[in-house]
Image: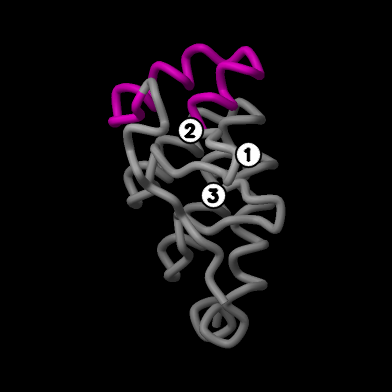
Amino acid sequence: MLTRLMSIFPRRREKQLIRAAEDGQLALVEELLQAGGNPNAKSDDEFTVLMWAAARGHIEVIKSLLESGAEPNARTRKGRTAEDIAVQEGHESIAALLNEHGALADPQESGITVHNTP
């Protein structure tokens, strides 16, 4: 049933995934990802799912997102990455994990931008 609902309401699905990642709800994040959730979805304020998890310090959620294809070098229009946000919030272990998964020290080097999906 969740899969059927997710195909009907893609934007609602993304918002639910973002909220679950922000709240550290690992089981729900994994369920939504398995049902086709976009690990690179962006909220209205340009934060990716990974950025929200990094801001809140949810390392297990971040591991799951990375395993599901979340892009560690995605950035906001201002050039902020999940690693930048983790450092700003004092989550050094998360910044190190993101770095291990290919996060670039200088986000301008990546040339990657993740866009909202309609």
Determine contact: label 2, label 3, CB under 8 Å.
no
Q: Amino acid at mark 3?
A: Ala
Q: Secondary structure at mark 3?
A: helix
Classify residue 58 by image quadrant.
top right
Q: Which residues are magenta?
A: 82-104
- Residue 84: in magenta span: yes
Residue at the spot x=47%, y=36% of the render? 62
For label 1, the residue is 24
**The N terminus sits in image quarter:** bottom right
Residue 60 shows which numbered tag?
Answer: 2
- Residue 61: in magenta span: no
| Mark found first going from the N terminus, 2 or 3 | 3
| Mark found first going from the N terminus, 1 or 2 | 1
Determine contact: label 1, label 2, CB under 8 Å.
yes
Q: Amino acid at mark 1?
A: Gly
Determine contact: label 1, label 3, CB under 8 Å.
no
Above or below: residue 79 compared with residue 117: above
**Colour approach in the figure:** one colour
Q: Is residue 95 left or right of residue 80?
A: left
Q: Position of residue 96 (x, y in %)?
A: 40, 16
Q: Position of residue 51 (x, y in %)?
A: 56, 39
Q: Secondary structure at mark 2?
A: helix
Residue 27 shows which numbered tag?
Answer: 3
